[in-house]
Structures are given as C-alpha cells and as structure tokens.
Amino acid sequence: MRYLTLVGFCLLLSLQHVRADVLRVQSQLANMTLEQKIAQMFMVSLYGTQLTESEQAFLRDVQPGAAVLFGKNIESP
C-alpha cells in the first residue's frame, strides 16, 4: 500500500511539472504572431561551416523552428 501511495505522490508531482510546462508554452504561444508560429514549423539546412551574412539575416528574421547541421557543416568535433 505504501508503494502505491509513493507512486501516486510521484505521479502528482510529475503532473504538476507537466502543467507548469503547458502553461509556459501557452504563454509563449499567446505572445507569438501567426508568422512566428508558422515559422516554428519549418526546419532549415545550412551550407558550409560558417554562416554567411544572408544566412544570419534569414535566421534572425524568419526564426525557423530548427536548423539541421550535417557533417559538411562541422570542421572538427
């Protein structure tokens, strides 16, 4: 019985953290424009090992949800 009480307590704590995360995300979404929300759905690839000025401007202006790096983007570990 104690084990079930402990599991229930841990589940309750976990749900409280999930609720806090959900509230944080909802707050962030409420403050985003439609354009920003749509941009978050895009994943972009970059060329080379350094960002060009145009790539920097693109990432700053569009703010995509993710940027993928491949082996060609990395010179050394």
Image (tube, rainbow, N blue to C red):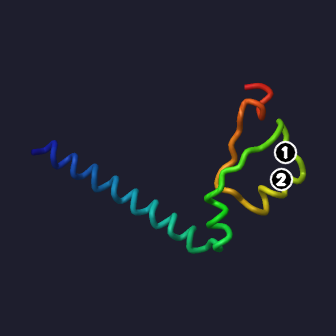
Q: Is residue 34 left or right of residue 2?
A: right
Residue 23 percent coordinates (x, y): 46, 67
Residue 19 percent coordinates (x, y): 39, 62
Question: At 90% across and 51% down in the image, what residue appears?
Answer: 53
Residue at mark 2: 56
Labels 1 & 2 near each other (Cβ < 8 A): yes
Q: Hey, which residue is sitting farthest right in the picture?
A: 53
Q: Hey, which residue is sitting farthest top in the picture?
A: 76
The image shows residue 14, relative to residue 70, as above or below, that is below
Residue at mark 1: 51
Corner quadrant of residue 12? bottom left
The image shows residue 37, relative to residue 6, as above or below, that is below
Identify the amino acid type marked 1.
Leu
Label 1: how many Cα within 10 Å (few below 14, some 14–19, many 20+): few
Q: Is residue 64 left or right of residue 55?
A: left
Secondary structure of residue under mark 1? loop
Who is closer to the viewer here, 77 or 5? 77
The image shows residue 59, relative to residue 36, as above or below, that is above
Secondary structure of residue under mark 2? helix
Identify the amino acid type marked 2.
Gln
The image shows residue 34, relative to residue 52, as above or below, that is below
Question: At 22% across and 46% down in the image, what residue appears?
Answer: 7
Question: Which of the two discs, 1 and 2, labels the residue nearer the N terminus?
Answer: 1
Question: At 71% across and 49% down in the image, what residue appears?
Answer: 44
Who is closer to the viewer here, 65 or 13? 65
Who is closer to the viewer here, 43 or 26? 43
Label 2: how many Cα within 10 Å (few below 14, some 14–19, many 20+): few
**Circle on res. 20:** none
Question: At 79% across and 63% down in the image, what residue appears?
Answer: 61
How many numbered marks have been drawn onto this rendered protein structure? Answer: 2
